[in-house]
Amino acid sequence: NAVNRTVGAIAKGQNRVLLVMATGTGKTYTAFQIVWRLLKSGLKKKVLYLADRNILVDQSIQQDFKPLEKVTHKIDFSKDKNHLEELGSYQVFFALYQQLIGQNDAKNYKELFPNPDYFDLVIVDECHRGSAKDDSNWRNILEYFSSATHIGMTATPKETKYQSSIGYFGEPIYTYSLKNGIEDGFLAPFKVINITTNIGDEWRPTKGQKDIYGNEIEDRIYNNSDYDYNIVIEDRIREVAQEITNYLKSTDRMAKTIVFCADETHAERMRMALANANADMCKKNPDYVVRITGSDEYGKGKLDYFISVAEKYPVIATTSKLLSTGVDCKMTKLIVLDQQIGSMTEFKQIIGRGTRLREKEGKTYFTVMDFRNVTRLFADPDWDGPIEIDPNYQSKHKEPKQYVFPDEDDEPKGPKEPDPKPRPKPIVAKDGCQVMVINKVVSVYDTNGKLLRTESITDYTKKSIIDTYATIDTFTSKWKETKKKSDIAEMLKESGIDLAALKHDQDMDDVDDFDFICHIAYGKKTLTRHERAEQVKKRDIFSKYGEKARLVLEALLGKYTKEGVSELESLTVLENDPFRKLGSKANIVKFFGGKQGYLDAVKELEQNIYSIA
């Protein structure tokens, strides 16, 4: 629909087109299809694709636009200015705004393309950024190539008093929202865990308290809007890093995670705290945690690996702005918000880093972990409502403005004037303010961003289980008839319930899933896996088997005690220790008279495990 409407409108002479499509629904692929059709039909001959970050350009060239690689060129002003005649052989040009503008507004685009009619199609990626603003340098490029058709693409059109995507491109010719994407099964649904610390809303230094530099800390009330912006509390960073680590330990240590921090310095402190909390994983691979920010050359070099579906490392990326727009992080399963977010545009872009659905690779939903209570923005009517132009929008074509207004999405432009007497941001040592998580609440939203329910994680779990299994007898019957017990945990996970994480929070890691569900939902007393295994041993159910078969069953019971029932449910367990000492998988099943005999024995073992009250 987006392609057909756009091509049709251009064929009829429309020269400004806006496409609004949620992150993860294929804006760049749509752009490629439009370009392909327009080039093949002869309606357009020269195309300029504009973006503001190298990663956006490189992703587009290497992925969606690859079928046009023979006629595609990425502009590099320092090289291209000496080979202008060679540019004529290309049809699709990719360029950064910064390359075309040049140092000190040199207007490199005029030197490369002295004919302003050179391009007949200009595509503006992430057009909510500078191009939506009347007085930006970026807009000067568009005005220079004004005779061309301009297509703006964004998930979040910017509509403020001083900026307007609609004011420039017109009303969207096609809109596909996050709501549409989730309902149609193309985007991943999500849950939010709001985490409150003991200093979330209020911390005040004691009388005369000093920071690590020996300076007295200003006596006032500090809160989430201050931490890491105006004051650094070391123990808060440690606690946030530990909470992230606890969640990953109880779910998936290799789940791709983005931690959005206050600034680049905070991102580095968070990287170090996460590295300390995950020392075991960093020992296996130092790139388990990496800072990926604009000034970190090492981290930027790891960006392609982080966003790759095939590459395992890095697993956790700490950042401030670099990963908030356009970067295609397909496998992101956890988004951590530890920065203040003041605009709906930025909020939607950040949430969009997790919306890509990858069912084959095991990503069917994602989680947002919020340490700053910024997910309150879901309550904003702009979350997924209609796009409306600000009635106070002042286009410079109507009334020139006197001032330049900063783009809240942009990185700071150039250095600030130094303070004549600089005083470092106060840093409170770990023993100067002890921080702990005091509450965790899971929030479930519908596709309109409407709050369905907000409950403690325990209450939410209980309600969800009882909604599915009204009585303990119903649940017990379902558990007994389910061939793979782990399927029940997976089914609950799809409802946003992570049994492993919840067990860890309640210090019940050694409790069987069956007992834990009965405890949470129906108030039953729990048994540990060790207690269940000991009861099975007392029944002497192994005596009817041969010596080697008994060894296998005893080892399986040991696996169950340590890791749970899922270890019994796959033949692949026989490929690992301690079973390898007994021979190959094929050889081990022979101890039971063959594969079916082995499966029957395991089934009997399970029945005995769960027949104990």
Image: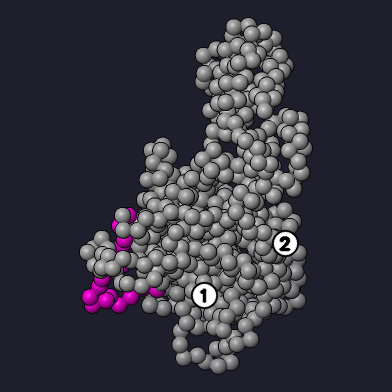
**Residue 287 pos. (x, y %):** 41, 45
> In the figure, is residue 141 to the left or right of 532?
left
Observer-nearest of 515 and 317: 515
> In the figure, is residue 399 to the left or right of 178?
left
Q: Looking at this rendering, what residue extends furthest in the bottom direction?
A: 399
**Residue 410 pos. (x, y %):** 47, 71
> In the figure, is residue 87 to the left or right of 216?
right
The stretch drawn in magenta includes residue 420? yes
| Color scheme of the displayed model | one colour
Q: Which mark is residue 130?
A: 1
Q: Which mark is residue 180?
A: 2
Separation of residues labelled 1 and 2 (CA atoms): 27 Å
**At 43% across and 39% down in the image, what residue appears?**
281
Q: Quadrant of the N terminus?
A: bottom right
**Picture quadrant of residue 588:** top right
Tell me if residue 113 can be seen: no
**Picture quadrant of residue 593:** top right
**Residue 225 pos. (x, y %):** 44, 69
**At 49% across and 74% down in the image, what residue appears?**
408
Q: Amino acid at mark 2?
A: Asn
The stretch drawn in magenta includes residue 466? no
**Residue 209 pos. (x, y %):** 27, 65
**At 33% across and 66% down in the image, what residue appears?**
205
Q: Looking at this rendering, what residue extends furthest in the top direction?
A: 546
Q: Quadrant of the C terminus?
A: top right
Q: Which residues are magenta?
A: 413-430
Q: Amino acid at mark 1?
A: Gly
**At 55% across and 51% down in the image, what residue appears?**
334
Q: Residues within 10 Å of mark 1 (few under 14, many from 20)?
A: many
Tell me if residue 420 can be seen: yes
Q: Is residue 465 above or below residue 261?
A: above
